[in-house]
């Protein structure tokens, strides 16, 4: 049976990261955009944990804890923003964010 | 002891927490004045930064090498503290336009300040991420603080989405660098520079980190957010973004490029030059048709990031020293401009340039400060902006001997300066030579606002007239880096 090596983890994390980026660019609903952002951060987490395991030190895993915390803070702010925006516009779509223009 | 080098940051965080505590016992009508307390605390900490306890006089590595306290770090910390004092005074003038939670607004400004100050000392990728995010998350809140105004919310959402994308890219870059170097410490990574230069993964990682930091300083192609966010955010927040967040981005760029990747800095010279040229052209050209003064300053801040990148691509002591000098002049000019916008737009909540028509008739002091700031940003001698641009161009010209591509870049920079003269003087023209509406009330300035405006005006002139005084400090700070 084949064992999973570092490159397998990196390929998966790269795929997740690309999917997340694609979601941020292509999706129109703000909630889905936030979900895609989380996917990008977690792809980086996966890469860090795998690198940490194969480097044989724990620095990467420590950073993962910081990233999880920061991601939670970011989403808390983001959801609060969506609620405030929804109260004003009755919508959570990217197209409705177009009042700031030349 | 290691922790003594963190006293400044600890003091800033404690004054933010103390402010929130005092808020509980303060009646609603006096809460506005807490901003003076916050500004006073920041000013005291600024004075304390000159004491022997926090300033060792030499370069010191603390906390297992992840934190450095040297002349460069202290220069940036004093810069951020001074900016925060002026911006907190601006926030007090702005307080009547914030419906609820003015104390939180002051406190969050202090927390963002703490993030910037840590960023100045970063010598480890984990600390870089934490300081950057402390800044970013507080700025998301500060940007959308006027939550009943649609523009502010929209700016907040845009900044959050683009900011989160850029930090995800940054983290992915850190993961790749960590994977190939086996450590996050800048000094240890620099020791393996020869090895890492061969590794495509590590080079790609550094490129992603450059993208993440480039977002903070609004350099092309990561500049999309700046105009919208500057226009929509509350005016003091725009000012803090333009001064603090941008300077912190440059502090981190200098730390990463000189601390962790000195070899790459050389091989990326061309890339950095192209970024610099594109940023100058984009910022200058897009600023021309703008009618909203805050949006105009957003584009001007993009162009300024391009000029500062001249110093980064030069990569010499002279280049870094010129960056610091330019930032010192930029601080006073930008804070002065936003301060005047904040006061003048109080009456009808519009920042259109036509609002400033005839300003010289009814408030000559405000008009002259705004004009001084525009003249300094445009780079007219003898203002601070002139010597800053001169030093940056000179540092790039010195490199042109070894690499002729710099002549093209210098040409682009000079074209940018000429274009910028046009749009800055458009504002000056509106202030002095356009007939304004007659029914204007006289604007009464509070004493602290007057003090802050006089400080900015004096700063813009003195930094320009006595360049040697400032240049001595910036040279000493720049020498702390490795070249």
Image (cartoon, rainbow, N blue to C red):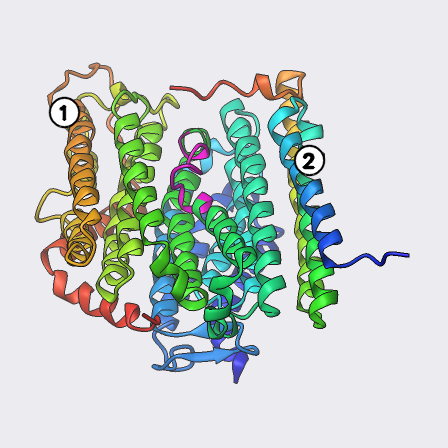
Point out the residue furthest to the right here: A1
Q: Secondary structure at mark 1?
A: helix
* Residue B220 is a magenta residue: yes
Given this view, does label 1 or label 2 mark the residue nearer the observer?
2
State the quadrant of the C terminus of chain B. Answer: bottom left
Which stretch appears magenta? B215-227
Real-space Cα separation, disc 1 to disc 2, in angstroms: 50 Å
Within 10 Å of the Cα at label 2, are there few (<14), some (14-19), or many (20+) other Cα atoms? some
| B238 lies above or below B266 | above
The image position of residue B316, as x and y in percent, is: 26, 64
Which residue lies under the disc numbered 2?
Answer: A19
Circle number at residue B251 = none
**Frontmost residue, B82 versus B419:** B419
Which residue lies under the disc numbered 1?
Answer: B429
Q: Secondary structure at mark 2?
A: helix
Q: Chain of mark 2?
A: A
């Amino acid at each position: 049976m084949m064992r999973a090596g570092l490159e397998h983890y990196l390929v998966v994390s790269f795929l997740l990261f690309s999917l997340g980026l694609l979601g941020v660019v292509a999706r129109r609903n703000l909630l889905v955009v936030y979900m895609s952002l989380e996917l990008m951060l977690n792809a980086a987490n996966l890469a860090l944990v795998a690198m940490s395991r194969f480097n044989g030190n724990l620095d990467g895993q420590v950073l993962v804890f910081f990233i999880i915390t920061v991601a939670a803070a970011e989403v808390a702010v983001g959801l609060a923003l969506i609620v405030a925006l929804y109260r004003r516009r009755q919508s959570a779509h990217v197209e409705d964010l177009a009042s700031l223009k030349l | 002891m290691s922790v003594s080098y963190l006293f400044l940051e600890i003091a800033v965080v404690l004054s933010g927490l103390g402010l929130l505590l005092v808020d509980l016992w303060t009646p609603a009508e006096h809460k506005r004045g807490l901003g003076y307390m916050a500004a006073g605390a920041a000013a005291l900490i600024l004075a304390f930064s000159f004491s022997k306890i926090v300033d060792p006089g030499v370069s010191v590595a603390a906390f297992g090498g992840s934190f450095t306290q040297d002349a460069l770090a202290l220069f940036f910390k004093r810069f951020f503290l001074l900016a925060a004092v002026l911006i907190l005074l601006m926030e007090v003038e702005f307080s009547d336009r914030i419906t609820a939670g003015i104390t939180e607004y002051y406190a969050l400004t202090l927390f963002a300040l703490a993030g910037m100050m840590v960023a100045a000392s970063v010598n480890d990728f984990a600390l870089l991420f934490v300081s950057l995010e402390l800044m970013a998350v507080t700025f998301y809140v500060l940007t959308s603080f006027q939550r009943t105004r649609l523009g502010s919310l929209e700016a907040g959402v845009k900044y959050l989405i683009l900011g989160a994308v850029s930090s995800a890219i940054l983290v992915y870059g850190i993961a790749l660098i960590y994977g190939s170097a086996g450590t996050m410490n800048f000094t240890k990574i620099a020791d393996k520079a020869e090895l890492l230069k061969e590794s495509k993964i590590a080079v790609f990682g550094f490129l992603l980190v450059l993208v993440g930091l480039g977002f903070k300083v609004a350099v092309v192609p990561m500049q999309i957010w700046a105009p919208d966010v500057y226009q929509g955010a509350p005016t003091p927040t725009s000012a803090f973004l333009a001064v603090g967040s941008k300077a912190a981005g440059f502090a981190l760029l200098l730390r990463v490029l000189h601390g962790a990747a000195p070899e790459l800095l050389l091989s990326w010279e061309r890339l950095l030059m192209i970024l610099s040229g594109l940023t100058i052209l984009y910022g200058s050209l897009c600023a021309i048709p703008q009618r909203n003064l805050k949006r105009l300053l957003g584009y001007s801040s993009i162009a300024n990031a391009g000029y500062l990148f001249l110093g980064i691509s030069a990569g010499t002591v002279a280049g870094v020293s010129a960056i610091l000098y330019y930032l010192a002049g930029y601080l006073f000019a930008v804070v002065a401009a936003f301060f005047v916008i904040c006061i003048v737009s109080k009456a009808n909540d519009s920042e259109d340039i036509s609002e400033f028509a005839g300003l010289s008739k009814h408030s000559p002091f405000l008009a002259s400060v705004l004009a001084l700031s525009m003249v300094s940003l445009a780079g007219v001698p003898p203002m601070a902006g002139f010597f800053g641009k001169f030093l940056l161009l000179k540092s790039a010209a010195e490199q042109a001997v070894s690499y002729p591509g710099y002549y093209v870049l210098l040409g682009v920079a000079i074209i940018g300066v000429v274009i910028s003269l046009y749009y800055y003087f458009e504002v000056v023209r509106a202030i002095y030579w356009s007939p304004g509406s007659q029914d204007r009330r006289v604007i009464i300035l509070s004493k602290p606002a007057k003090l802050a405006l006089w400080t900015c005006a004096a700063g813009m002139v003195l930094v320009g007239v006595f360049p040697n005084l400032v240049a001595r400090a910036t040279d000493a700070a720049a020498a702390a880096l490795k070249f």
